[in-house]
Image (cartoon, rainbow, N blue to C red):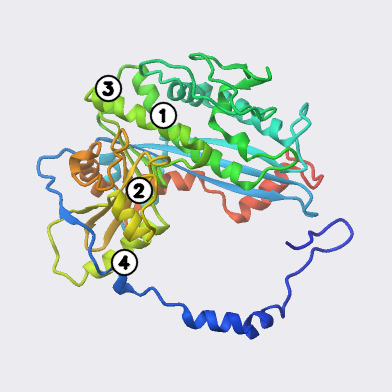
Amino acid sequence: MPYQGGEHLPGQAASKTSHIDVIESRLMQELLTRFERREFEDDQRLAPWFHLDLSGVKPLGDTVATDGSLHKVTSDDGFRELCFVKTARFHLRTGDAAQVDPQFPHPLQIQRLMKDAAIHCSAVFPLRNMVLGRFANVRDSIRELIREIITHEHGGIVYEAMKWLLYQGWGPESESPDLGCPVKGCKSAGPLPYNEDEGRCRECGAKIYITDVLGLHHDIGEDSASEAVANAYMAIHEVLLLVAHLYRLWRSGDFDAIDDTLFVKDGPLMFRGQYATLTKRMRQLLSYFRDENRNIYIVGQEKSGLVFDHLESQVRHLRRHSEPAWPQVAILSHAYMRGRVQRLPKAQHTYGSRTNYGEKVLIRLDPSFALAVNIPTGEFMSSESAPSEAHHFIGLDRIIATLPHLVSYLHEGSLVPINLAHGIASLSYYPSGAALQRFAGIDDVARPP
C-alpha cells in the first residue's frame, strides 16, 4: 500500500524495477511452466440447449428496468473521500421499444421514449474524514443518510415499498427480519413489530431504524467506510425501485398491469452476505404471487462473470453447427453451475441456496444475439439437478417471448430498457467526476449556488 500524497509532499509512486525480482525468481519461472491454458475445448461439451416453442405466447406489454452507477470523489490531498450513487428506473411500453431501430436508433425516438418515463435517485456517502453534522463517526452518519434519503425520495414511495417487502405487506403480515445492533454490535437487536419505522435494541436499548435491516452498517467502520457500502446500497436500491413500481400497482389493485409487466434488472438476481435477508423476502414475495396465480415476471441480465464467459464459449462452439429453430434455451442446474461453470467440488450447501432469488438461464434469440439471464423459480429448489424444466420458472415463456422486442445491437447482447436506464444513471469519469468534486466542496472550493 503506497503512501498517500499530502499537503506538503507527493504520494509514493510504484517501483519501476520491482518486476525484475519477480522475473528472476526460479520459483516463479518453474511455476509458470506448470500452468496450463484453459483452451476452448474444455467448453465444447454443450449445455442442455433446447428449442422453446413460443407459438401462441403473448409478449408482456410493459417493461420496467433499473440500473445504477457510482463515482468516488477524493480531495486533491487525498485526505477526504465521498462517494456519489445514482440509480434510475425506466418504464416503457414493449411495443414502443420494438419500434426503435436496434442498429441505428434515431435520437428523436429515444428522446420521445425517455420523456416522462424515468425517475432517478441520488445519494452521497462519506468514506473518509467526512461525517454528517451532529454525528461523531462515519457509521452513524451513513445510517442517518440512508434513512433520510430513502424516506424522502420521490415522496417516500421507495421507503414504503421497502417496508412492504420487509414486513411482507402482501400477506401474511409479519415482523421485520432480525438484525444485529448497528450501534453497539449486539448479536441480535430483535425484529421490529409490523410496520414500525424504528424501535430499540432488545439488548442495549439503542435506537434502530427499519432501514438498518438492510444490513449496510456491517460494512462500515467507526472511522471510515469502503466503497463496498456504496456498491451494496446501489444494488439494493436498484431492486427497491423495481419493488416500488410493483408496490404501486399492488396498492392500486391493478393486478392486470402486474401480469403484463416485465421487470428487468441489470445484473444477477442475488444478495450476498448479510444482505441475503433480502433474498429470502424476494423469494417469499415471488412465491406468494405465483401461488395466487399472479406471476411477477422479473429477469436479471449478467454482462460479465463466469456465466457470461460460459455463454460466450458455448456460442462460439454452436456457430459451427447448423442453425436450429429459434429461440434456443439452456437451463443451468445447480450441479451444472458448480461443476461446469464454477469448476468446484460439491459443497455442503446447494449452489445459490443462501444468496440467489433467480436461477441461471442461457438464451439465444438468433445466431448473433445471446444473453445470460437470471429468472426466479419462487421458493428455492434444493435439488442439485434443479432447475431443469421450463415450468420450474416463473413465466419463462412470456419473458423470452418479450425479449426479441427489446433487442438492441448497439452493444453485445444489449437490451433497450437497460440501455436507456444506464443512460440516465451512469456517471462518467469526465466531466461528471470533476463536476462532482467541485460540487462536493471537499477542496474548500465554493459550491455553486
Whole-percent x, y for residue 61 in the image: 25, 35
Q: From mark 1 to mark 4, how far is it between C-alphas?
A: 34 Å
Give the residue at mark 4. Answer: 313
Give the residue at mark 3. Answer: 255
The kind of residue tagged 2 is Val
Q: Residues within 10 Å of mark 3 (few under 14, many from 20)?
A: some
| Mark 4 element type | helix
* Residue 194 visible in the displayed image: yes
Say whether marks 1 and 3 touch (CB < 8 Å).
no
Q: Earlier in the sequence, mark 2 or mark 3?
A: 3
Q: Which numbered disc, 4 or 3, marks the residue closer to the eye?
A: 4
| Mark 1 element type | helix
Q: Which numbered disc, 1 or 3, marks the residue closer to the eye?
A: 1
Whole-percent x, y for residue 412 in the image: 36, 60
Say whether marks 1 and 4 touch (CB < 8 Å).
no
Give the residue at mark 1. Answer: 281
- 354 left or right of 331? right
The kind of residue tagged 1 is Arg
